[in-house]
Amino acid sequence: MAGSTFGTIFRISTWGESHGKAIGVVIDGCPAGLELSELDIQPFLNRRKPGQSIYSTPRNEDDTVEILSGVFEGKTTGTPISMLVHNKTQQSKDYNEIASYYRPGHADYTFDSKYGFRDYRGGGRSSGRETIARVAAGAVAIKILNQLGITFTTYTKSIGEISIDYSKFDKNEIFNNKLYMPDSEAAKLAGNYVVQMTKEHNSVGGCVEAIVHGVPAGLGDTVFDKLDANLAKAIMSIGAVKCVEIGDGIHVSTMTGFEDNDGFTMSTDNKVTKTTNHAGGILGGISDGSDIVLRATFKATPSILKTQKTVNKSGEDIEVSIKGRHDPIIVPRAVVVVEAMTAITILDSLLLNMTATLDGICKFYQA
C-alpha cells in the first residue's frame, strides 16, 4: 500500500492500524540540535485523544507517546525520529459484524475494490486513529516553527449550521470548551445541537479554521508546488475532509475583482504589506507575508445507530445500524490534526526555500 509518506525534506511516514498493537510515525529530515522529549509531543496528542467529553467516542485511550530513536541527551541527532503510541482499549469484537457488509460513508467498499481485502476492525488504515501519527510529527514541526516566530491559532469555526460570531471572537475561549470554539455562546448552542443529534442516533459535521502568524513572504513554488496546493493536499489527506478553502475561499465567486483584490502599502517600518487579506496570505502559490488563513470542512461521522441502507458482500440489499464506539462529531478532535498537517507543510516549504536563491546558499555556507 503506497501513500503513507508526506513531505520532501521534512518527510513523515505513518504506520499502524486502528486495532493493531500501535500507531506510529517516522520523521526524516528533522534538523539536529532541536531540544525534544515526549513532554513536547504529549500536549498535542492530548488535544485529539478520545474519551474526553460527551462529544467524542467513549474509547478511552491515554495515547502516551514514546520516542524510540533520533533523540540523544535531549536533542535531535539529525537521524530518523521514530515515535509510537500503543493501542490499549481496542474492542475488535464490536466490528465482527461489519466484515460481511459495506458501511455507508466509509472506505469499506473502496478498499475491497482496490485491494480485494480490508481490515474491518475500526477501518484499519482509513481510521481516524491514524491521525495520532500526524499530530506527533506536527508537534515537532510546530516546535521548530515557533522558534522562528511562526505561531498558530486553530479552532472550530462551525458545527452544523451554528457558526462563531467573529465580533465575539475570544482566543482564550478556545481551550475553555470541549468544542474548541472561540465564541462561548456559539459553543453552547453547538453543544446542545450535538447532544440532540446523538439522542436521535445521528451525527454532525463542521469546519475547522487555522490562522498561521509570522510566515515570511516567498514560501512555495509556481505551477505544481504552490504553497496553497500543497496545503490543500495535506488537509484533504485527513479523513472526512471534503473541502479546503484558502482566504475568502468559496466566497470569492460572489466578489468582484475590486472587492477581492488586496491592495499593497508601505508599513511604518518600510516593508510591503497588504491593506486586506482576502487571498489568505498566498498569491500565485507563494506566501506574501500576511497571515495564512485556511479552512477544512469535515463531513458528519458516518458510523451512526440510525438505520441505513447498504449491501453485503453477497450482493444483497440490507439495512444496518452501526454498533461500536464512535464520535458523534469529529471536528473538535480534528482541530489539532489540521494544525499539525499545516505545520508540517509550512516547515517543509521553509526548508525547501533555503535553496531558492544563489545568494541564500552563499550566505549559508560563507557565513
Image (spheres, rainbow, N blue to C red):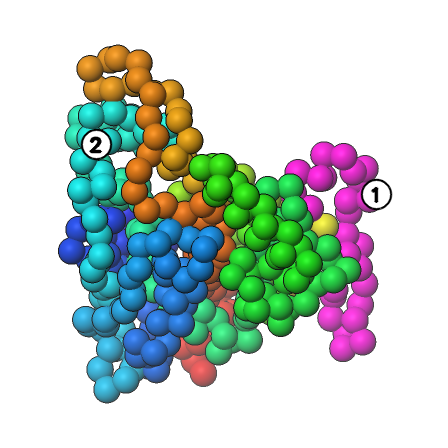
Residue 308: x %, y % from top left: 39, 24
User: In front of the other: label 1 or label 2?
Assistant: 2
Residue 258's disc is 1
Measuring 64% from the left and 41% from the top, which residue is drawn there? 161
Q: Is residue 258 visible?
A: yes
Residue 97's disc is 2
Disc 2 is placed on an element classified as helix
- Indicate whether residue 265 is drawn in magenta: yes
- Indicate whether residue 248 is drawn in magenta: yes
Is the residue 197 above or below the residue 346 in the image? above
**Mark 1 crowd level (few <14, some 14–19, many ≥20, 10 Å Cα):** few
Q: For residue 2, what is the image quadrant? A: top left
Measuring 48% from the left and 78% from the top, which residue is drawn there? 147
Residue 301: x %, y % from top left: 43, 40
Is the residue 229 above or below the residue 321 in the image? below
Which stretch is magenta? 247-276
Is the residue 212 above or below the residue 92 in the image? below
Between 96 and 22, the one lying in front of the other is 96
Measuring 49% from the left and 37% from the top, which residue is drawn there? 200
Work out how far the residue at label 1 is from the one at label 2, CA to CA, in angstroms.
57 Å
Residue 202: x %, y % from top left: 47, 37
Q: Is residue 238 visible?
A: no
Label located before the other in sequence (1 or 2): 2
Question: Going by the image, does 11 lie left or right of 87?
Answer: right
**Mark 2 crowd level (few <14, some 14–19, many ≥20, 10 Å Cα):** few
Amino acid type of the residue tagged 2 in the rendering: Glu
Between 51 and 147, the one lying in front of the other is 51
Question: Going by the image, does 159 lie left or right of 127?
Answer: right
